[in-house]
Amino acid sequence: MKNLIFTSLLSLISIFSFAQNEMYLKAMEKSVASFQKAATVADLQLTANGFERIAKAENKAWLPAYYQSLCYMMMAAKSNDGKQITTVINYLDKAQVALDQAQAIDENNSEIYTLQGYIHQGRVWEDPMNKGAEYTQKSFAAFGKAMALDPTNPRPYYLKGQHTFFMPVFFGGGADKALPLFQQAEKRFATFKKASSIHPNWGQDMNSHFLQRATAQ
Amino acid sequence: MKSTLLLSLLFLASFSYSQTTIKGIVLDETGESVIGANIYIQDTYDGTSSDEVGAFEFKTTMEGEATIVVSYVGYEDFSLNITIAKTDLSFNFKLEPSASELDAVVITAGSFEASDKRKAVVLKPLDIVMTAGATADIAGALNTLPGTQTVGETGQLFVRGGAASETRSFIDGMWVQKPYGSSVANVPARGRFSPFLFKGTIFSTGGYSAEYGQALSAALILETTDLAPRTKTGVYAMTVGAGASHTQRWEKSALDVSVDYFNLSPYLKLMPQNIAWDKAFQSVNTQLVFRQKTSKTGMFKLLSTFSRSGFALQYPDADNVLQTNPLSLNNDNLYLNTTYKAMLGEKWSFFSGLAYSNNQDNISSNFGLDTKDESIQLKWRLGTQLHEKVSLKFGGEYLASQWDEAFQDKESQGFESQLKETYLANFVETDLQLSKKLLARVGGRFEYSQLLQKMNFAPRTSIAYKTSKHSQISLAAGQFHQTPDNEQMRFQQNLNFESADHYLFNFQQIKGGRIFRVEAYWKEYRNLIRQAANGQRNNLGNGFARGIDFFYRDKTTINNGDFWISYSYLDTERWYRDFPEASTPNFASKHNASLVYKHWIPKWSSLIGFTYSVASPRAYNDPNETAFNAARTPVFQDLSFNASYLTTLWGQSTVIYVAINNLPGFKNNFGQRFSRQANTDGEFTSIPIEPGAKRFFLVGAFVTLGQRMTEAERKAL
């Protein structure tokens, strides 16, 4: 009898946790789909909100916080027109807080280090003259760590390439320096297999775009 | 048993399918709707975003006690405990802007900060390097800020009617005995320390912290950089010298060594000079900088510089204007500064420092004058957060110094002087965050001088109040004491500290790349050294300085352009030293203004800039006139230009730098130097005091080797 109670309880719990997991997957899939469609800052804001809600409820999963951070990072990038620095700083700060949450859950994750490098890159935009050297250094260190943690991850190569592409020749940047990075990224994008339907899988289009530009120059 | 459990679980599950609608509106502090705010029930997926009018609506399957959270970028998270029954709920939320670093209230009275530390600073470290006319000299750049008076013949900082000796420089909290290179009267000096050494500069033109003492007018507080980011080597060549440096970076430490050699002789031969040089200025400087990260919060820093410099020239003789006398100066300077900083546990921060300075000047002319200054300083400081709103710091310092001078001339026997000082000080200071908008700082400093056999106490206080999101007002008041300089002390030691009381009122607005500041001040000098008719010195001197400083900086209006305008009005008089009456001293000018402009040209990767400075006439005493200090210098004007071109040479990052000071060749005059005795016609003859040359040109190339990819980065590809 006791045994029966135990098994039924156990099965109930697993049904519940399965349902819970199903709910998580569904919610994430929906949000990832809207992330892929998001074109404007407003779209990204709504998507970020969706990820934030999941992230706040799921404190064992790194993906929701990671995506939330990524949304804010992209909002910062889209707002970076030189006229609304405070907004850019606010988005970067928010992206960093969310990424710290993801990092606390998964300490050694190549994707998280990649995004960290991207956020550091954003700090350069705040004030290129005064922050350029320091944050480029930090950004490249994070990309280096991301490459070491997962040599098949194309994104650190793509983002490092992008940063190098826009960096003045004087500081070791330029199209010719960026080209091999885009090529390395391209090679990895071609064979990259995402771990699940909700794992990071972005950047390929932009990389092809930059690869073309860098080749043309 | 089993059935009841199952039933109740099913019951629970079925309940969770009943839904409640939650709706409402989100507004900001001004009542505007917030678009895209996130509204959700904590620990559930239930929630939504606010729409174009700030409205939201969502359904939840939650029942009972819950927390609803509203969040939006740039605003404080808002949360509310609610009870969800089956009835629909409606809310009006009002968000408060988050207190970001930009909005925090900070004490700004009296001080200009150049750093990357805080976002709301007036200057960045690079601004000091890139200011035209300053040729990368710290004092030169700070002279474009309000509150300073241009005194072109010295190259030093004069603040709000104070003499150069009333401004003290500190590196990492430690006193710098000789911040300027050695020079003789009316030959301008340059700062000894490169602006590239520092990540933060606080230039306080009054009302500064109780941590700093022995400066009646101003404190220049310099903070050195931390670990250099990477290993690199640099070399440079200029029209006046060359140098090399190497930085080695390890994981937790970094070492930087550099050597500079300056020789003005080729330049002086090429350009016409007003000064007849026998031997052009030459110097060799070596510098060693070491940093060690000792723990997560611990940092040990060492800075050591040694320089040897000298020159010889024909010094015009005011007593016999047809004649010049040979004069040479040789200087050796050693400075050592070590500091250690760390957190002691979670709550206490600890700082300790040791500085040693040794300076020797040998002047030889138709007389000989050898001066030696040596000092050692020890300092410690503890800081803690007593309470969320109250922080406290306190510390102490010990300084031992000795000054020796030997004078000989052909006629007399010569004489020797010596002064030995032991100085002790303690300070305490607390910051009280009285409200989100109101910050008060109260502190005091106690000092004892063995040379004077006197002690003093200096209370200091300042208050800052945030008047709006972008603006604030600050007030400061304080007492400042300084031991009379050696020129006074050598004659007589039974004297007291000279003192000044500061009162400042400051308004500052920072909004979207534009900074506006205005500061009014009143400075009362007391106990200044006065020389009585019998040659006896006393502390009966007094004086005042009052004025208003304006500063406006704009980085937004002109695309890729950045400019600042400073204007200072100064009204000052003092009755001290050998003055027969109260008078405006020679180093004070009523009006000083500067316009600094910098423009970045991305296409050429070049930064160009110019600085225009103007100062109203200064008073000087002409003994041929009966009235004291009645003569006036002409108006001072200077227009300087500089350009930096960033490029690569042999694949290495290179900066080509060009600077021209006083491009239009304004004829500046700083007064006259008079003969000591009247000639047979009863007249005092004089020599005009003028810049060494009308213009100054500088061309240089700075190459940084090793900015390329590291081995590890290459391998990663």
Image (cartoon, helix red, strand yellow):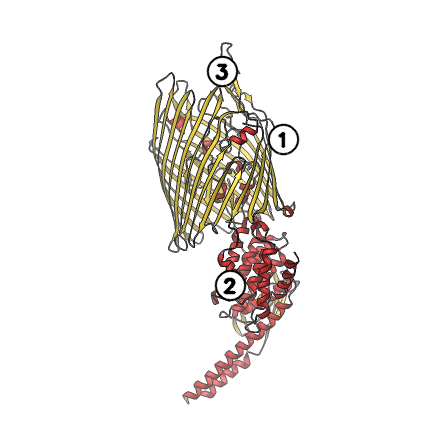
Label 3 resides on the chain identified as B
Q: Position of residue B667 (x, y in %)?
A: 60, 26
Q: Which numbered tag is attached to residue A146?
A: 2
In the visual, does A30 lie left or right of B288? right
Q: Position of residue B253 (x, y in %)?
A: 42, 51
Q: Earlier in the sequence, mark 1 or mark 3?
A: 3
Residue type for callout 2: Ala
Q: CA distance from mark 3 to mark 2?
A: 77 Å
Q: Tell me the quarter of the image containing the C terminus of chain A.
A: bottom right
Label 1 resides on the chain identified as B
Q: Residue at x 62, y 71 (%)?
A: A33
Residue B78 vertical position relative to residue B424 in the rendered view, above or below: below
Residue type for callout 3: Asn
Q: Residue at x 55, y 81 (%)?
A: B14
Q: Could you tell me if residue B589 is visible in this image?
A: no
Count of all numbered marks drawn on residues in the image: 3
Q: CA distance from mark 1 to mark 3?
A: 33 Å
Label 2 resides on the chain identified as A
Q: Which numbered tag is attached to residue B664?
A: 1
The front one of B207 and B473 is: B207
Residue type for callout 1: Pro
> Are dots 1 and 3 in contact, CB under 8 Å?
no
Q: Position of residue B89 (x, y in %)?
A: 59, 70
Instruction: Write down the residue under mark 3.
Output: B320
Residue B460 appears in which quarter of the rendering? top left
Q: Residue at x 63, y 48 (%)?
A: B602
Q: Which numbered tag is attached to residue B84?
A: none
